[in-house]
Each structure stands twice: as C-alpha cells, then as structure tokens.
Image: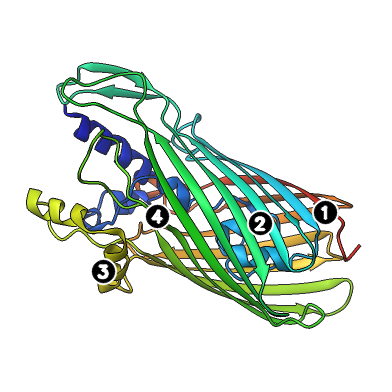
Amino acid sequence: MSMIALIKRVVVFTTFIFLSVETVWSQQLLNLTTTPVPFLRITPDARSGGMGDVGIATRPDAGSAYWNAGKLVFSPDAGSAVISYIPWLKEISNDVYFLSAAGFAKAGENQAFGLGVRYFSLGDIQFTTDGHNNLGSSRPREMSLDVTYSRMLSEKLGLGISARYIHSALASNFSVPGYEYKNAAAFAADIGLYFDNRVYGNGFTLGTALSNLGSKISYIKNATEKDFIPANWGLGASWNKVWNEVHSFSIAVDINKLLVPELNGDSPEAIRQYRMKNVAESWGSSFSSFPGQASMATGIEYSYLQKFAIRAGYYYESAKRGGRQYLSTGIGVRYNMFGFNFSYLLPSGSGVNQNPLSNTLRFSLLLHWDNANQ
C-alpha cells in the first residue's frame, strides 16, 4: 500500500468520527466534502455543546475565541480561563479523546489578549497493507495553538483576530518504501466581528466569523499537491432577556458554511485540478454548492441567579458537510470565581444507523477573576 493510500485511510478515519453512520454507508458519501485536520471542527466547550453547538453571538466567556474572537473584549470579567475534556466517539472506542484549554486577559477596557490550545488523540490504530500485512501500530494525534487579540471598535462593536499553528501526526514510527512521510503542519487565522446591542442585559447580539483561513496541508515531503484545511464562514444572532436579578434567558442561532470546494469527479485529473487550486480561489468556488456544506445550530439557555444554568439545543447539517443531526442538553454552575459546565448529546438512531456521536459528554472547568458583576 502506498503512503498516499495509507495517509488517506487515516484521514478518512478521522473524518468518519464526525459523520452519522447512516451518512457513511449511504451513496451520499461520494459527494461528501472531506478535509484533513477535521478536529478543528469539534466544539471544545461544554456550554456551547449543551446549546447545539452555537457560539458566534452568545454571551462572551473564556471559550469565546474559538467561536468569535470579537466577543472577548465584551466579557464582564477582567480575565477568564477554561479547560475542557471530551471522551470522543465513546460508543465505538474508549481511547479517543479531545482536550482543550483557553483563556484571556483584558488590557484596559478596550482590548483583550487570549491563548488557546487543542489536542486530539485518536488512540491506537493498527496499520496494514491491502494484503493485510502488518505495518505496525501508531497513536495518531493532532493539535493547534492559538494567539488572539480582541479590540473594541466602538461601544457596541468588537473585532478580534486569531493566529493559529496546526500540527498533525497521523502515522508516526513506521515507514513505507518509496515515500518519505512527515508530520503535517499549517498556519491559519480567524477574524470575527461582534455587535452587542444589549441594555442592562436585554436585547440582541450579532456576530460573524471567518475561521481557519490558511495554508494547505500535506503528509508527503516535497508534495506539489496539497489539501485544504476546513475554512469556515459563520453568522450568528442571539436574543437575551433579563427579567430580574433571579431569572434570565437567551436563544441563539448560528449558520455555518464550509469554505472548501466540492471535488467534481474521482479521476486522477479531476483530483489534480482540485488540489492545484489556490486557497483564495477555493473559498470563492465553495459557494457554487451553496446551500450545500452548510449547517444550522440553535440553542437556548436559562439562568437562575447567574449561578445555575440549564441549556438545550439542536444541530443540523447538510449531507455534503457530514450529515450530522442531533439534540443536546447541558447544565452549568458557578460558585464565586469557579464554574463548571457539562453537556450531553442525546442518542439518535438505532442499530447500524445509530449516530456514533450519541451519548457524547463534555466537561469544562472555568476560572473567572475580577468579575465586574460581583
């Protein structure tokens, strides 16, 4: 088996974990747009996970930079940090997990700086040739490091940018004759705008974010044809109501579009032409399939005394983006400067059609300091 086929097998596996089983085994897979480093699409924090994976225009928190860096500067905290853990694909494997940490600190009233890291371990994978000869085992892993800057442009408008380094090690510690394997790396950036029209917590917020705008990636040394990372454009809106110091409520909606073009055909020439596209060209040509590769998420959150929260949400995406559909729920508690969020993805489907993401759990621990509302 060639190194290209080997790496493709691992990339397909990493992509599989985001899809419903029904989609994977249907003819729709032929039209599915896949990318390397799909871990960049995993919702890292339990608060957003409990609200159906919304976050572009929701109330700012320590994990805001993942969704929209323009939100950070509107946080009531002088600083905040969060660490999250997700046992991923737990219905199929017990050694795949996602770990993330993020935090920010304000520098005055009009700007904030943030850092973030994400680490995805795919567990132990046994590699074989097409003839079932053993090539050895490996523990594929991927990670990203982020640096974020957020600035208030006006009393209601914030802008944020993030620079990102992406590292992917899918098949370490063994080789295939004729190919020189390397760990893959890429650089990317996010840019987000956040509009906060709330008065005493009441009103609406809007947001838009472009994420993972960056270089192409390859696992073969000196490769001339590389693949696109999962660039994305998102729009979000949230409405917030505070009745009194005890009760508050919010509802949010996000729409996301994958900025990766479709592959038209599977011939060698079609694949070559696809990979020869430059990055900027790929963003524009991805809209030829709109509303394909799109997803929608909606979520609600009820807060009691700003100390206890109940959340629920629904996520839907087109078959070309992955075909995931699910309901989620979650809770959050806060005591002084500490917080804890938990989310649960409700089971869907049954038997061979069960969503492999069913019963996904997310856990987040938070730390707040110098909260202006305390």
Quarter of the image for residue 319 reads bottom left
Q: CA gap, disc 4 to disc 2?
A: 27 Å
**34 lies left or right of 151:** left
Say which of 136 and 224 sits in front: 224
**74 lies left or right of 291:** right
Residue 214's tag is 4
Q: Mark 1 points at which residue?
A: 334
Residue 285's tag is 3
Residue at image position (32%, 45%) is: 217
Q: CA gap, disc 1 to disc 2?
A: 12 Å
**214 lies left or right of 372:** left
Q: The residue under label 4 is which amino acid type?
A: Gly
Q: Nearer the viewer, mark 4 or mark 1?
A: 4
Q: Is residue 48 visible?
A: no
Q: CA gap, disc 1 to disc 3?
A: 45 Å
Q: Which of marks 4 and 2 is in front?
A: 4
Say which of 147 and 40 sits in front: 147
N-terminal-most mark, 4 or 1: 4
Q: Mark 2 points at which residue?
A: 47
Q: Residue 183 appears at what percent x and percent y?
A: 36, 32
N-terminal-most mark, 3 or 4: 4
Mark 4 residue element: strand
